[in-house]
Image: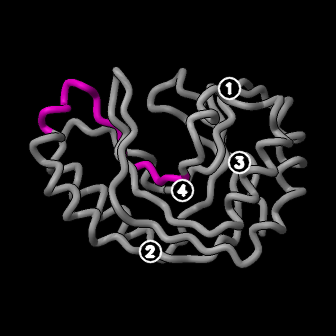
Amino acid sequence: MKYTSCFIGIPLPTEFLKKYREVAAEISKILPGIKLAELDSPHITIYYLDEQSQNNLANIKTKTTKHLNSLKGSKITVGNMGLFSNPERIVLYLDVQYDNSLIIFHNEITKELVNYNAYDNSLGFTPHMTIGKICKDNEVTFSNNKESINRIIDGVDWTFEVNEIIIYGVDSRIQPESREILSILKV
């Protein structure tokens, strides 16, 4: 199988799942055109691998596992609104505050995974938790409701220690898009 995209992420701990779903539902009421991210297993994206063949996954897992020790004791705080924008859509996300150990880990796996690199890794290191995608047709509705959305997100302040990293595979050729957990790596 060939995945249309793969990425490395930190799963949101179960104690925050209910609140994450509530935040997404409140935003969905304000922005009915938003395409929400996966609500069953939200995660913080920390490294994007783009399209990958299943043949590459064992090597990606081995190379990533070598650097897990740099994450021991690492803490993350999720909160605040962030946006990525391109000509087709706006991606609404929760911003992530992190300590130096996540930067070290990212730099190490960037070197290790250079052969599996994706073009947008050159845009800078921006760990984030996607809430949803807003197509440009709904941009005015988003702009008109940005303050209300920000108030909802202001209630988010989740801090936790990184205990695992997950390698995800996505196949967007089918709808709804298929996302699988390919490997769970314990820190």
Mark closer to the chain start, 3 or 4: 4
Looking at the image, is mark 1 or mark 2 nearer the viewer? Answer: 2
Question: From mark 2 to mark 3, how far is it between C-alphas?
Answer: 22 Å
Q: Mark 3 points at which residue?
A: 167
**How many numbered discs sit on the rendered protein?**
4
Give the magenta part as a residue range: 127-141
Q: Which of 178 and 187 is in front in this view?
A: 187
Identify the image quadrant of the N terminus. Answer: top right
Residue at screen point 9% across, 43% down: 144
Q: Name the residue under label 4.
A: 43
Residue at screen point 33% across, 28% down: 89
Mark closer to the chain start, 2 or 3: 2
Q: Which label is found at residue 51? A: 1
Q: In this view, does 126 lie above or below 87?
A: below
Q: Which amino acid does label 4 sit on?
A: His
| Within-10-Å neighbours for mark 4: few <14, some 14–19, many 20+ | many
Question: From mark 3 to mark 1, how far is it between C-alphas?
Answer: 13 Å
Mark closer to the chain start, 1 or 2: 1
Q: What residue type is labelled 1?
A: Glu
Report if the CB atoms under discs 3 and 1 are less than 8 Å apart. no
Question: From mark 4 to mark 1, how far is it between C-alphas?
Answer: 19 Å
Q: What element carries label 3?
A: strand
Q: In this view, does 136 lie above or below 76?
A: above
Q: Which amino acid does label 3 sit on?
A: Ile
Q: Where is residue 127 in the image (x, y as percent from the top left)?
A: 55, 53
Question: From mark 3 to mark 4, how far is it between C-alphas?
Answer: 11 Å
Q: Where is residue 28 in the image (x, y as percent from the top left)?
A: 22, 49
| Within-10-Å neighbours for mark 2: few <14, some 14–19, many 20+ | some
Q: Which label is found at residue 158? A: 2
